Amino acid sequence: MFDPMTLLAAPFARGDLPAPGPEAPMAVLRARPPSAPVFAPGDLKCEQGMRPLHDALAQAGFDVTPRLDAPEGAFAAAAVALTRAKAENRANFARAWRMTRPGGAVLAAGAKTDGVESLQKDLRRVIALDGAIPRDHGRVIWARRTADTPPEFDRWIAEAAPAIRVEGRFRTVAGAFSWTEADPGSQLLAQNLPPLSGKVADLGAGWGWLADAALRRGAPEAVDLFEADAAALDCARRNVADPRARFFWADAAGPEIPRGEYDWVISNPPFHEGRAVSIALGHGFLEAAARMLAPGGTFMLVANRSLPYERRLNELFGQVEQLALTPRYKVLSARRPRRRRA
């Protein structure tokens, strides 16, 4: 898998830029655990809001936080590991620029499929770039922070920031799943939910649209939102104001997931890692749901029609049925989770 951290290290390894260290650490937004020992833990101050990546960085000894709100000019250098979200990438570069003191380097690294070339073109319109190194189907680019901040950077930050964008009442943020509209798959699942009761879990709750719909179906006593993306979960806290809702920053495969507690689990499971389809990622959500349910509980999910989840569901549950089918999506229901030893 492509590693932007190794690419970020290239200008330092070549001597193009002074290397970071404990006395002058570099801020890295959307940092990942490096696949090779290119940075020591003391070299970096990391921001990573995805729980599994955050925890992997912490386990490796890096200083990491879900949101790095540093004063202007706090770092000698700052960098961005790019994602698939163009608006988030531009905003993060603008934030990295603000965090860097004048004269310091501001870097970005990512695969071509993450839009590094698009970002490079956008940056060239507003600042002078100092260097670029193409490598491994990706690129690292950098600039020297000047005393002035281009006005475009303020606009980029505002365009990506949490704001009400959906249905006139839902707050979303760039980088979150389906941040400009309610996902059609989630809408189909909501249409097929029966009246809910007891305890409900929304696994992979995003910014809260499906949980909000669940609270309006029947009279659930509680709806717990589990989401790995801290920024999306922060939006959900604002969007789902019902006192029956609780919020958990959690990885579906992590130890934070309760066992045997829920009457219902609902989910629109993710199935991409980067741009690649990952059936294993979706299977992880199915397995988590089976663990979370009480013996008489029900799991309801929506998935792309082509995803082969039925076999794994039949291994995990005693009863599986298809409730809805469209040209793009299917809604599945699974009951009677099979108990396995922990």
Image: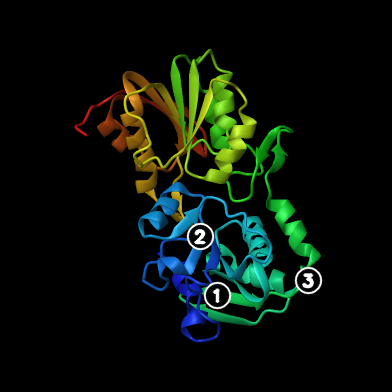
Quadrant in which the N terminus appears: bottom left
How would you rate the neighbour count of disc 2 (Cα within 10 Å): few for under 14, some for 14-19, many for 20 or more? Answer: many
Say left or right for 237 vs 329. Answer: right
Q: Amino acid at mark 2?
A: Cys
At 37% from the left and 67% from the top, the residue drawn is 35
| Residue bearing mark 1 | 140
At 72% from the left and 79% from the top, the residue drawn is 128
| Residue bearing mark 3 | 148
* Residue with the most extreme left position: 341
| Residue bearing mark 2 | 46
Pinpoint residue 289: horizontal percent, then vertical percent.
Answer: 36, 31
Does label 2 or label 1 sit earlier along the sequence?
2
Q: Nearer the viewer, mark 1 or mark 3?
A: 3
Q: Nearer the viewer, mark 2 or mark 1?
A: 2
- One can see residue 308 in this view: no
* Residue with the most extreme right position: 151
Pinpoint residue 240: horizontal percent, then vertical percent.
Answer: 61, 28
Quadrant in which the C terminus appears: top left
Q: Secondary structure at mark 3?
A: loop
Residue 149 disc label: none
> Eyeballing the image, is 141 above or below 212?
below
